[in-house]
Image: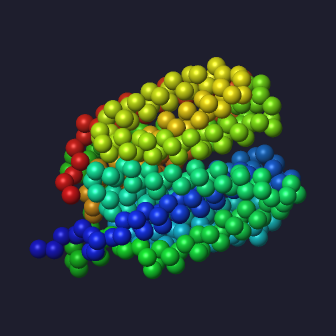
Amino acid sequence: MLQERTALVQTPNVAITVALCFLVAVVEGFDIQAMGVAAPKLAPQFGFDPRQMGWIFSISNIGLVIGASFGGWLADRVGRKPVFIGAVLAFGIFTLLTSLVGTFEALFVVRLCAGLGFGAALPNMMALAAEVSAPEKRASTAAVMFCGMPLGGGSSALLTQLLPPDFDWRILFEVGGVLPLLLAPMIYFLMPETLTKRAPGARRTNVSAALFADGRTPATLLLWLAFLPTLLILYLILNWLPTLVVANGLDRAVAPQASLAFNFASVVGALCFGSLVDRMDTRWPMTFAYVGLIISLVALSASSGLAMTLVLSGAAGFFLLGANYALYGVAATYYPLAVRGTGSGASVAVGRVGSIIGPLLAGVLLGGGTSASGVVQYMVPVAAIAGAAVFGLSFCRRPRE
């Protein structure tokens, strides 16, 4: 009797698949951060006001939520590889088009479409990490893949330091758009498909059943409860950390150093916690990560000197991204192969709602008179909720392979 989905049709070359996903994560991180890096030059050139720039920053995240929701669902039906290639082509093309637009409306549309591509790629990478690696290496495999994102984001900022001071902001989107277009044919020729096509006449599993049937309700809800506050904190820090550093009394010229410390320390954290989760499972490494994040946030809120601020920014990145990318690795394992893309996509989509709320929440708090330290302190109970959810998740049953 044919099953709806079977395991690997061929033994995938794990190293090639992981390397290609890592490179996709690098260019995705580069493209996502490029808008923030380009904004100081782009906004005055076109006369965009802060409200318009707020929408430009937010719309790609909104597209990412939609793309993640449909990308994983579609991959469960037509296969990981075609959806993954389509996602990479989409964010490459629309990132490249960003360099050609000159109106708010056109920029709004291309950033929305780029976000759809960003989102569709993520659940496929999560599913691939679970499907190409041995069970004892899933978290570390996902960590290796996804640590490309902060490397790419940091590279976007570093590129501006290598260019002349009067560089054209468009070059960021030209580089960020061409690289994914070069990767797409490599994925086509080198990456194996990890799922067979659905057997003729096989019954389809709807989204609700994929997420909540067969005892998956607790795992699904706890994954959502972990992802949303984690991404809320992450994107609040990514967008507001330099501003918060300046508000705490440090010079504006050194503020970006805090973001660099946060991004690059997160790579080390992702690799460390990915390895620990593979060795010890999720409960204690992930709980420790969120406890470490809470301590880092409390200390960062009280910090004023440059050296200590950089150390604590790095510590926050180490624990926060370490937990986040390890979570990417284990989330897919709570769903059987046939619905893994749907489950992963739903987790990413719910988490990305947090990525939209986080920056807006910081703006509301600061606009209401909350101090920079107060904004960071507000994140402590949010981190505690995520940590409690991950602790509860460790007791949930995983499906047999």
Task: Answer left or right for 281 relative to 344.
Answer: left
In x, y percent, where is residue 394? 29, 37
Q: Is residue 293 above or below residue 163?
A: above
Asked if residue 135 shows in the view, the reply is: yes
Q: Residue at x 71, y 51 (%)?
A: 157
Q: Residue at x 51, y 24 (%)?
A: 295
Q: Which quadrant is the C terminus positioned in? A: bottom left
Task: Name the one closer to the observer, 250 or 77.
Answer: 250
Give the quarter of the figure containing the N terminus: bottom left
In the picture, measured across the screen, residue 279 lies left or right of residue 94, that is: left
Q: How many numbered discs? A: 0
| Residue that sits furthest to the top in the current view | 302
- Give the colour scheme shown: rainbow
Residue at point 60% right, 29% down?
312
The front one of 369 and 156 is: 156
Left or right of 313 in this view: 2: left
Q: Position of residue 166 (x, y in %)?
A: 88, 57
From the top left corner, tell me how far across and down residue 214 is, in percent. 20, 50
Instruction: Please say if 15 is above or below 275.
Output: below
In which image quadrant can residue 80 be found? bottom left
Q: Nearer the viewer, residue 21 or 34?
A: 21
In the rendering, at what x and y percent does residue 363 appear?
A: 68, 35
Kindly identify the residue that appears in the image at 40 percent across and 65 percent down. Answer: 15
The answer to whether one can see residue 74 in this image is no
Q: Residue furthest left?
A: 1
- Residue 6, by quadrant, is bottom left
